[in-house]
Image (spheres, rainbow, N blue to C red):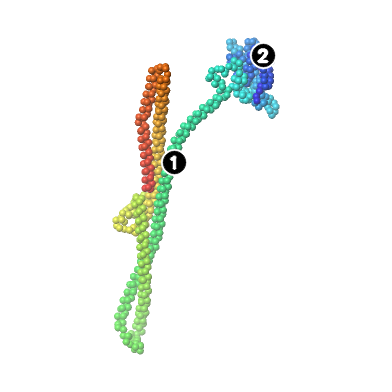
Amino acid sequence: MASISKLSIRGVRSFSPNDEEQVIGFCFPLTIIVGANGCGKTTIIESLKYAVTGSLPPGNKSGQSFVHDPNAVGQSNVKASIKLRFNNRGNNSMVVIRSMELTQKKTTMTFKQLDGILRTVDPTTGQRVSLSHKCTELDRQIPNLMGVSKPILEHVVFCHQEDSSWPLQEGAVLKKRFDDIFDSTKYAKALEAIKASRKDYASQVKDLKAELEGLKSHKHAANGFRNELEKCQDEISGVDDQINECVEIIAEEDAIIAEKRKILLDIQAFEAKLDDKSFELSREDAVLEKQKELLGDDVMEDKTTDELKEMLRELDDKQGYQSARALQEKELQIQRIGRNLEVIRRAANDLNTRKGKLEAAKEAHAEVLRQRFKIMEQIHKKHQIDLMTQSQDVESHAMTQGTTATSMTLSTIFTSSSINGDDGTNISDEDVDAFLRALRHKETTLKNEWDNAKRKHQTDEDDLQSEISELQAQKSAVENDRRRTEMTKNEAMRELSMVSGQMSSSLTRVRKSDVDEAKRHAAQLAATRDELNNNPRREDIAKEIRVQEEKLKSISATVEQDTKIR
């Protein structure tokens, strides 16, 4: 706890500046000062108050009457000092020194406060430390060191006798004094700051709620767009799967076609070879018949062996050895031709069997081609693929005359096939490649259109949401004005009821002007109410909100339709 120990005074009021300092010791816990009038009791209290708070006593002409009069000592200036030894709230001994100077000029006196000194003892070294401070700094530091606020020291502890009746002053001054003593000003400011912060936070909460509503609507729309995007992605994946299946089927069919073409070439070569062999067989048959004609009738049927031998000897004798040899060779040749004919017949049977198998495979391949054509036609009808345009777009920089003709054929392939009764088996590889390129291009176009529509719809929805928010805010403002008007009207009606009751119960007469004024006020409130009720802007705002909501519904319907088309 803080306490004061000694007080030294020089040059203050009746204490002469030329004498030694007057030292006063204070006892603990109580010190009583007794003396005659004018001996300096009040000066001691004033000096204590000045040393602690830096406040001059009331009615001293800015300190001129607080310092000893220079005219009394015959000097032009007088210096005064007050020293106070006290123990701070940490029970450490400290000394505060305050100095003043009063200068006598020709007609006026000038009072000046000099810098003060705060002296203490260093607890570590035990040496005395002196610090010089300005008066305002001392005025703040000494109350903090003593642990007592400056208003309490001024108005309670060291209260001047001329100012001791402050509890009887008017309310405003008394309130200010109590606020200073109890330091309630900062609490009042804190309450004001809290109220202002609360108001700001309330407005922020209102704005954030409105923003939250907008974000909820945006979130709902985003969820809808996300679901639509997932559906479109699923459809795109389905189309990609169909494309991949078509590509795989086409690749398999191309491989089968190549194999079948190779087999067909083998069949054609074998048929040509068979024709050659048949021609050789027919030629050999003709040679054989010719040989038989040359030989004539067979005279050897009715002959015996001996006779035949005899005929042979005769024949040898007649025609010689060469004729017999030629006949033997012809017989051998006939045998060879017979054997070759049998081999050719067996080969012809094998080829016919193989031909039947190849024709069945060809029919199966044609069925696969027809199925491929149907799939391509379904995709074309479903997605409206323009083959001619796509082919021209893909190869616009390197198109030759043949490519242009192919593109024109592809652009009318499905129509011409339907008109001519073609089952789709005569579609070339170039047609299939053009169809695949068109299908990929259509997929890219649909993706780009979906992205553009999504961005456009998002922008339109944001604009509509902002317009709806603005209209709702305007509607809320109109409703708030209406409610305030209703409240004002009700308050006026209550006041009129109270005035009517007072008029009926009181014996005094009410002035006619007051009644007229009340009637005019009530008429004004009624007119304001009617104006707000008949304000066409209310209905316009509601209509605009409905129009914007209809627009939002139409945009959502458009998005759903685009999704279905996709």
Kind of residue indicated by mark 2: Gly
Q: Residue 219: which disc?
A: 1
Q: In terms of sequence position, does the residue under pointer 1 or pointer 2 come before the other? A: 2
Label number found at residue 460: none
Mark 2 lies on a secondary structure that is loop
Give whichever of 39, 156 is nearer the camera: 156
Nearest to the observer: residue 58 or residue 71: 58
Asked if marks 1 and 2 touch (Cβ < 8 Å), the reply is no
Quadrant, the N terminus:
top right
Q: Which mark is residue 35?
A: 2
> Distance between the Cα atoms at labels 1 and 2?
87 Å
In the image shown, does 23 or 171 lie closer to the viewer? 171
Q: Residue at x 68, y 16 (%)?
A: 22
Q: Could you say where residue 74 lies in the image, as x and y percent from the top left? A: 64, 10
The answer to which image quadrant residue 41 occupies is: top right
Question: Residue 244, position in %: x, y?
Answer: 41, 54
Q: Disc 1 on helix, strand or loop?
A: helix
* One can see residue 85 in this view: no
Q: Is residue 515 above or below residue 356?
A: above
Instruction: State the image coordinates of residue 342 (x, y, percent, origin top left).
Output: 36, 75
> Few, some or many C-alpha atoms within 10 Å of disc 1 (few <14, some 14-19, many ≥20)?
few
Work out whether 254 lies above or below 42.
Answer: below
Q: Nearer the viewer, residue 71 or 290?
A: 71
Q: Residue at x 31, y 84 (%)?
A: 298
Callout 1 amino acid: Lys
Answer with left or right where residue 101 lies relative to residue 173.
right
